[in-house]
Image (spheres, helix red, strand yellow):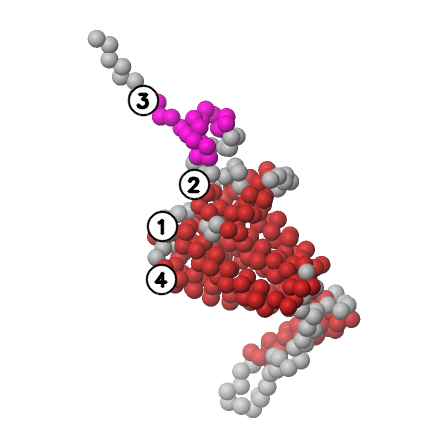
Amino acid sequence: MFVNFSMPIERKLCKNCNSELVGLYCSECGQKNSQLLSIKEILKEFSDNVFSFDTRFFITLKYLITKPGLLTTEYWLGRRTKYLPPLRLYLVMSLMYFFSSSIINPGIDKPFQTLDGFFQFELDKSSPKYDPSPEIVAPFVDFFKENFNKGVRVAEKKELTEQDLIWSSMPTAMFILMPFMAFCVYLLNKKKKQLYSYHLITVLHFHSFIFFIFTLEDIVPNFNPAFFLYLPLIDIFIKLYSLYYIFFMFKNIYQDSWIWNSLKLTTLSVLYGITIGITLLGIAVGRAFLLGYNA
C-alpha cells in the first residue's frame, strides 16, 4: 500500500479578486501580492501611479464622499486595484482645493497686523528682582520685530492679505502635520496592535475628504448666483455632513463603541486644532519675516 507523506501545498489567493496566485502578481487583476503594508510600499505605489489618471478616480471619489471609512478598510484588506492609491488621492484633492481657494474664491482680504504692541520689555536695573535675561533677548526680538513689521508693509504694498499669508498655507500645514496626526491616531488605537502605516492610510483618506469639503465650500457659492440666497443653509448642511462623516469614518474603521469613538475624536480634534493653528501662524509669521528680511 502506497502512502503519500508529502505536505499539502498551501494555495495563495489574491486579496483583491480571490483568484489563485502564481508568482508575485495576480494573473487575473494584476495586483501585487503584498502581505504587509509598509511605508516603503506606500511610497513606491505612489511613485508608480502619480503620473497616470483613469476612471479609478471617479470610483474612489464616489466612495470617499458617500461611504465613510470604506476606502481605508478596503485598502487594509488588500483590495486596492480598483481604487486610487491614498497618496495620489490626497495629492489630487489638495491640488483641487489649492485651485479653488486661489482662483475661484480669493478668500479673506483682511490685512495682516504688525507687532508694534507686542514683545515690550520693561528693564528696571535698580529693582532687586532685576533679571538680565530680557536685556540679552531684547536685541534678537527687536531684529525680528523690525523685519516682521517691514514684511507687513511690503505685503501691504503688494496687496497681500491674510488669505495670501495664512490660509493659502493650509495645504502645506496639513501635509506637515499629517505624520503627527497619524501618530496621534496610532496612540489612541495602540491596543489594536496595528502598524503606524495603517493609521497613516486613515489620515490620508481623512485629509482627502477635508480637502473635498473645503473645495466644495469654495465652488458652491460661485456655481450659481441663486445659491447665495441659500448659502447659510448650504453651509450648515456641509458642516453637519462633515461631522457625521468623520464620526462614522473612524467608527467604521476602528469598530469602537459610540462613547469611546466620541472621546477619541474629541481628543484628536483638540490636539489637531491646536497644532494646525500654531503651524499656520508660524508659517504666516515666517513668510512675513522673510518678506521684510529680503526687502
Q: Looking at the figure, which quarter contains the C terminus?
A: bottom right
The CA distance from mark 2 to mark 1 is 15 Å
Residue 204 x/y as whole percent: 52, 51
* Marking on residue 8: 3
Question: Is residue 223 or residue 36 the one in the foreground?
Answer: 223
Q: Which residue is mark 2?
A: 77
Does the magenta segment cover residue 17? yes
Q: Which residues are magenta?
A: 9-28
Question: Of the residues tagged 1 and 4, which is closer to the observer?
Answer: 4
* Residue 207 percent location from the top left of the image: 54, 54
Give left or right: position of 221 versus 65. Answer: right
- Check residue 280 in the rendering and tell me which mark sits there, or answer none: none
First reached walking from the N terminus: tag 1 or tag 4: 1
Name which of mark 3 and mark 1 comes first in the sequence. Answer: 3
Q: Quadrant of the N terminus?
A: top left
Front-lying residue, 218 or 31:
218
Q: What is the secondary structure assignment of the residue under circle 4?
A: helix
Residue beneath disc 1? 192
**Mark 4, residue position:** 259
Residue at image position (53%, 90%) is 127
The three-letter amino acid code for the residue at tag 2 is Leu
Mark 4 in CB contact with mark 3 (< 8 angstroms): no
> Is label 3 in a helix, a strand or a loop?
loop
